[in-house]
């Protein structure tokens, strides 16, 4: 058998920064490394449960979970350093590393922590493709959502299917400003919509369901929302209105929005904690 090679503690740290548990595996503590990786996955899954489950209220437990997850990751990184040192000590191996290699490893660790690691890639992927938190920009959806509330937006829900009536959508207004707005889907593609006596008429019939729409009094405002003005909704487009009809700038003013401008569905209030819960 060949002589065992020394394990470089700084390399173990770098590997643990790249992936939790990898430094322990490198240091021949395979079971320890795999266990740490499983724990990390479970912590991520628990956090996603708080975020993705619409009916689960956000509370201090989520913050404790996030702090615990961060503390655990720091512990794993430090532990990987001592696992490598322990391996060398147990096998009576002297650590040998040149100054340039030491500097290169430290620089790589700092770079990975500050710029990019799989730990960064997972939240970035989730934010880009699955769920994102967005601050409510105005009072258009009051009292359902208040200006300044932070909500979670499902960015995957409309990749195959279009919005349903009464969904609260986050969209970019067709003014090329890039700003995001929120409103409730009222009219669907192919329908004819009219606002009369505070009620929404779809294809000439008063809309009684869902209740969240029927109980709101919609004002005749904007060029598209005047009494007697029938709007034919094009294919792939939606007529949206804010719950706060007296102050909302919505499809009554700028017409229908195309599905391509819709970022996702607002489904849950995140902050403030006393208002956390599903958006109905």
Image: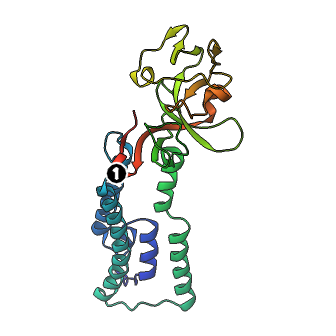
Q: Tell me if residue 255 can be seen.
A: yes
The quarter holding residue 84 reads bottom left
Say which residue appears at 53% left-offset and 29% top-offset.
245
Outermost residue on the right side: it is 176
- How far from the left and from the top, in percent, is residue 169? 52, 34
Q: Is residue 196 left or right of residue 6?
A: right
Few, some or many residues within 10 Å of mark 1 (<14, 14–19, 20+): few
Outermost residue on the top side: it is 204
Nearest the viewer among 247 and 268 is 247
Decide: is 150 above or below 198: below
The quarter holding residue 257 reads top right
- How far from the left and from the top, in percent, is residue 207? 47, 14
Q: Is residue 107 left or right of residue 62?
A: right
Nearest the viewer among 2 and 263 is 263
Q: Is residue 117 left or right of residue 48?
A: right
Say which residue appears at 51% left-offset and 40% top-offset.
155
For the residue labelled by badge 1, is the local secondary structure a helix, a strand or a loop?
helix
Q: Tell me if residue 8 can be seen.
A: no
Say which residue appears at 43% left-offset and 65% top-offset.
19
Q: Is residue 157 left or right of residue 66?
A: right
Identify the image quadrant of the N terminus.
Answer: bottom left
Identify the image quadrant of the C terminus.
Answer: top left
- How far from the left and from the top, in percent, is residue 229? 65, 14
Q: Which residue is mark 1?
A: 45
Say which residue appears at 67% left-offset and 44% top-offset.
178
- How far from the left and from the top, in percent, is residue 227? 61, 15
């Amino acid at each position: 058998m060949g002589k065992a090679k020394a394990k470089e503690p700084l390399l173990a740290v770098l590997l643990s920064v790249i992936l939790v548990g990898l430094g322990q595996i490198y240091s021949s503590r395979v079971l320890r490394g795999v266990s740490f990786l499983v724990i990390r996955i479970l912590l991520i899954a628990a956090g996603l449960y708080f975020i993705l489950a619409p009916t689960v209220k956000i509370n201090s437990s989520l913050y404790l979970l996030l702090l615990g997850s961060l503390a655990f990751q720091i512990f794993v990184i430090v532990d990987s350093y001592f696992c490598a040192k322990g391996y060398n000590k147990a096998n009576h191996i002297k650590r040998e590393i040149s100054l340039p290699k030491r500097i290169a490893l430290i620089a790589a660790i700092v770079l990975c922590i500050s710029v990019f690691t799989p730990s960064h890639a997972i939240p970035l992927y989730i934010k880009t493709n699955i769920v994102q938190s967005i601050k409510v920009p105005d009072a258009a959806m009051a009292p359902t959502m208040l200006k300044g509330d932070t909500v979670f937006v499902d960015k995957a829900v409309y990749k195959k299917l279009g919005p349903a009536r009464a969904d609260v959508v986050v969209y970019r207004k067709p003014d090329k400003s890039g700003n995001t707005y929120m409103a409730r889907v009222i009219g669907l593609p192919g329908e004819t919509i009219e606002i009369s006596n505070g009620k929404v008429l779809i294809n000439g019939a008063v809309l009684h369901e869902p209740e969240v729409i029927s109980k709101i009094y919609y004002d005749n405002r904007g060029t598209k929302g005047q009494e007697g003005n029938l709007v034919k909704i094009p294919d792939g487009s939606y007529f949206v209105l804010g719950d706060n009809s007296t102050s909302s700038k919505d499809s009554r003013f700028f017409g229908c929005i195309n599905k391509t401008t819709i970022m996702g569905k607002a489904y849950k209030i995140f902050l403030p904690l006393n208002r956390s819960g599903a958006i109905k």
